[in-house]
Amino acid sequence: PSSAASDVYKRQQQDAAEFLHLLLARMRLTELQAGRATEWPGACSEEGRATHVDRLFGFVEETRLQCKGCQSGKARHASARVLVLPVPPADPQDRLWTVTDLYYLWAKPEELVGDDAVECSTCGGRRTSHVQQRRVSSRPNVLVVQVGRTVAQGGDVLRHRVMAEEEVSFPDVGTFEL
């Protein structure tokens, strides 16, 4: 069996966020294989079993979709261990973003149209435009946040100024100390 580190280096990738994703997945898999997981109602995993990794880092990401045609709605829930926030939009004033700003940018309602349109069972299976809104709906013990980067023309990596506040507060899940 290979380690998370060797998986990252085999791909010639030295990205810390990718390494952390691989490390948490590998630690979770090792715990499952060793039988160190337990049934946990509402567990942050697909199998309904929780490991120590799930109990420390796991949370539920909720995505609500509402059809623009018939107004019917549905919610999807997915387990996650890292909150991946969006790349801030280009800002000529070189704005200082906070983790809270980026969370609200990630969670704001967004219209899905064209290729992003979703099938609506109420509208007879047609692909229709929907409004999507996301949120973190359960509180992890440790919240790991990843802030994205973008590559500009010419291959230069543009880094955005992001300030990690001492505390962040998300609706419905509470306050986290950073």
Image (tube, rainbow, N blue to C red):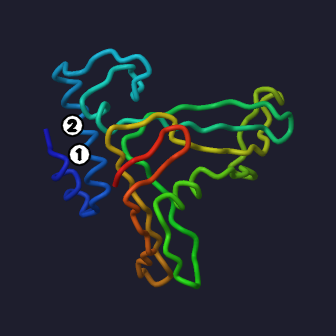
User: Vertical placement of 21 versus 173: above or below?
Assistant: below
Q: Which quadrant of the rendered structure holds the C terminus?
A: bottom left
Q: Which residue is disc 1 drawn over?
A: 23
Count of picture labels: 2
Residue 148: image location, x then y, percent? 44, 63
Please indicate whether residue 61 sits to the left or right of residue 37 in the image.
Answer: right
Nearer the observer, 57 or 79: 57
Identified by mark 1, the residue type is: Leu
Name the residue rendered at 79%, 41% in the picture: 128
SS state under label 1: helix
Please indicate whether residue 141 sits to the left or right of residue 112 in the image.
Answer: left
Name the residue rendered at 41%, 16% in the picture: 41
SS state under label 2: helix
Q: Which quadrant of the rendered structure holds the N terminus?
A: top left
Please indicate whether residue 16 sits to the left or right of residue 167 in the image.
Answer: left
User: Vertical placement of 101 versus 64: above or below?
Assistant: below
Residue 123, by quadrant, is top right
Q: Which residue is disc 2 drawn over?
A: 27
Identified by mark 2, the residue type is: Met
Asked if marks 2 and 1 touch (Cβ < 8 Å), the reply is yes
